[in-house]
Image (cartoon, rainbow, N blue to C red):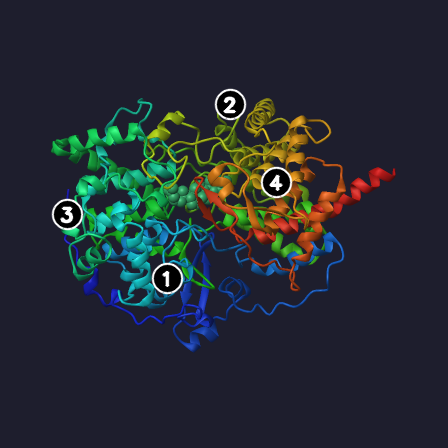
Amino acid sequence: MSFTPHPTAQDSPAWAQLEIPHSASEPFTDYSHWRLRVSDGGRQIWHFLKTEEEAAAWPQNMVDKYWLGLDTGLPTLPKAKTAHEAARNGYEFYQHLQSEDGHWSGEYGGPLFLLGGVVIGSYIANMSFTLGERLEMIRYLMNKANEDGGWGLHIEGPSTVFGTGMNYVSIRLLGMDAEHPVAVKARARLLELGGAAAISSWGKFWLALLGVYDWAGNNPVPPEIWLLPECLPFHPHRWWIQVRQVFLPMSYLYGVRFTMPENDMVLALRQELYVEDYHKIHWPSQRNNIAAIDLYAPHSAFYNAISQFLSLYELCSFSPLRKRALDWTYQHITWEDENTSYQCLAPVNKMFNLVARFHREGMESESWRMHELKRRDFLWLGPEGMMVNGTNGSQLWDTAFIVQALVETGLATEDVSYRPSLLKALDWLDQSQMTENPKHYEKAYRHRTKGAFGFSTKEQGYTVSDCTGEGIKTVLYLQSFLEFTPKPVSESRIQDAIDTILSLQNSDGGFASYELIRAGTWIEKLNPAEVFGNIMVEYNYPECTTSAITPLAIFRKHYPTYRSAEIDRAIQNAVKYLHSVQTPEGGWIGNWGICFTYATMFATESLALVGETYSTSSHSHRACEFLVGKQRADGGWGESYQSCERSEWVEHRDTQVVQTCWAVMALMYAGYPHLGPIERGVKMVMERQLPDGSWAQEAIEGVFNKSCAISYPNFKFSFPIWMLGKADKYIEHIKENATS
Ligand code: LAN
């Protein structure tokens, strides 16, 4: 084991203090100099062009302008008189946001605990940011601070110690002076909430790496757990992959008690972050000190007992065993980096991996260079500054929805001018399907990837059940439903995708996110993260289940001989699972979108696949009654992200376009026969359309792990276009049936 001596970041001009204006309403950099460079199958990285000559040689395109919040200059369109015209106007605008390689890029911000990891990790590992990036990250945080000066878990949440602590440290490291009014106010709020001593466990961990929280204040994360026999029902390879991949580098870093060497910044932060004198804090009693406002999933007594036991173990851990455990966890860390070309599963494990690799290999290494490079895939510049995206983008997800919308609404065939855009999308999808299993496969506890699609890019390399479903469904739409397209995705590659989908069905018929469910839900009792719910194991999700089976149904029609009995069974069992999780009120609880409107749209689509509709199925009937009961006087629907926290419907203050689309889509999937609610929903969405065909950004659309909201800004295009185009045909069809 090596403990690489590292230079301290503060000595580097790259982290020197900056003059920061008091107001963040205007950009701190010249927005006309930023460009989104798209490369390598959808990597999206914002570049700042230093000179006017460079800027003139590489003009801003529509994608740059739109996402930076600059005037796109797109024309006012003739006012739509029908839903179909409105859908068309929507795409007249949205086609301009397609990147030249065929996918749709976009922001994927929202969580406010990710930027802290990227900044602290970079500081520790002596990596830098450009001046523009630093300034715009500071500006983003200034813009996203709550009235009280603090930050929440996500951009719509109340201030928490986790959000405030991580982001306070970030603005300071990025160059804001401690006496800047924004820092003063944030610090006051942090101290009011109890100071950083009461930060949640992932915050404690980041602060300990930085040397501003004592390791004795952290519950143990011993790497030896990875050496336990794999057959044990709680072995980490059975945990939800997001937690497993975060726990992995954490256990390595905990095992070596990595701590950044003291410097002036570290000493200053120790003063600033705490209510009491840093050196007088009794650290062992901070392990379970979590501010009440942060707590979503309090520790179980079982977890606390295990932590106590592990604390005793730490006092007498046996060093040869520790060394073996560290070597083994390090090996797994390198496998994860290599399997994902250093993108890693998400930015949390990426930044912990980065610090672990830095610890063992130092700065003069391939891993340092690669991690340094790939950090930028997570940085996204929006109108309010630079944020850290929840993943390296949502490329596949956004591309799949808009393409399906175009095909289902008939827009794909009605206008030849849309053809190039569909052909480019197909080309991108062709290149985004994974064709091999991971380089480090079973030994790295990975699920198969052959034939799969991920949420973002092929390079990231993780199968997601519903992304594979939506990805291959989109390929089938393009290749089998349209006459003008080539067929680059071969039959055997389509079969690989179907095989991957079938490999992901759980015994009760449902589909989880990345893998099969590998352990019992009792492991949730070991959830150490306090701020998130349902993170320890995979669960079945109504949304993932639907996205997995809809392509199976389409595939079955076009390729009736391939695994057809299994496909039939898979669909039947999936529907049984969906029946079993419908709430007594008639909806389904959403896990990745907010909330009931989202999951109910998916569930009714699945039911329709087996002929269950409003008039034939009590499940579908109840779903419609539930949704219609939630429609507002203005014709729309609106749910707060708190629906996801509480698993019960919580009205949003305002009606939401995206949720209205989901609700109307659900009614249409269910074959709801009464046109009133559908027509009123359509009217509401049409009224909100802007003169250039776009829709304005409204409340946050997505969620994960019950408590953290996340933005899907492309949804405000794909779902209105889809819903309006579909509704136009649907309304006509119902009216025709009524008169015939
Ligand atoms: C995502 C983003 C995509 C999302 C969908 C495809 C929409 C979903 O249907 C399945 C699950 C998945 C892939 C998903 C899982 C959790 C992610 C990766 C995220 C919400 C993006 C960020 C989040 C990740 C867990 C953030 C890090 C936090 C931890 C608790 C580890």
Give the quarter the ligand 1 occupies: top left
Lower position in the chain sequence, tag 3 or tag 2: 3
- Left or right of residue 25, residue 205 in this image: left
Circle 1: residue type:
Met
The correct choice, above or below, for 165 with respect to 57 in the image is above
How far, Cα to Cα, is label 2 from label 1? 45 Å
Circle 4: residue type:
Leu
How far, Cα to Cα, is label 1 from label 3? 31 Å
Q: Position of residue 45 (x, y in %)?
A: 42, 59
Residue that extends furthest to the right in the rendered view of this protein:
740
Q: What's the residue at 27%, 67% (across, down)?
A: 179
Q: In this rendering, which labeled residue sits more in front, label 4 or label 2? A: 2
Q: Which residue is mark 2?
A: 508
Q: Which residue is mark 3?
A: 3
Q: Is mark 1 within 8 Å of ligand 1?
A: no
Secondary element at image label 1: helix
Secondary element at image label 3: loop
Secondary element at image label 4: helix
Q: Position of residue 401 (x, y in %)?
A: 58, 47
Q: Which residue is mark 4?
A: 476
Q: Which residue is mark 1?
A: 137
For label 1, the crowd category at 10 Å Cα-Cα, with few meaning under 14, some 14 to 19 and many 20 or more, is many
Circle 3: residue type:
Phe
Q: Which of 637/464 is in front?
A: 637
Q: Is residue 29 visible?
A: yes
For label 3, the crowd category at 10 Å Cα-Cα, with few meaning under 14, some 14 to 19 and many 20 or more, is few
Q: Which of 324/705 is in front?
A: 705
How far, Cα to Cα, is label 4 from label 2? 27 Å
Q: What's the residue at 39%, 64% (across, down)?
A: 139
Q: What's the residue at 51%, 32% (across, down)?
A: 501
How far, Cα to Cα, is label 4 from label 1? 41 Å
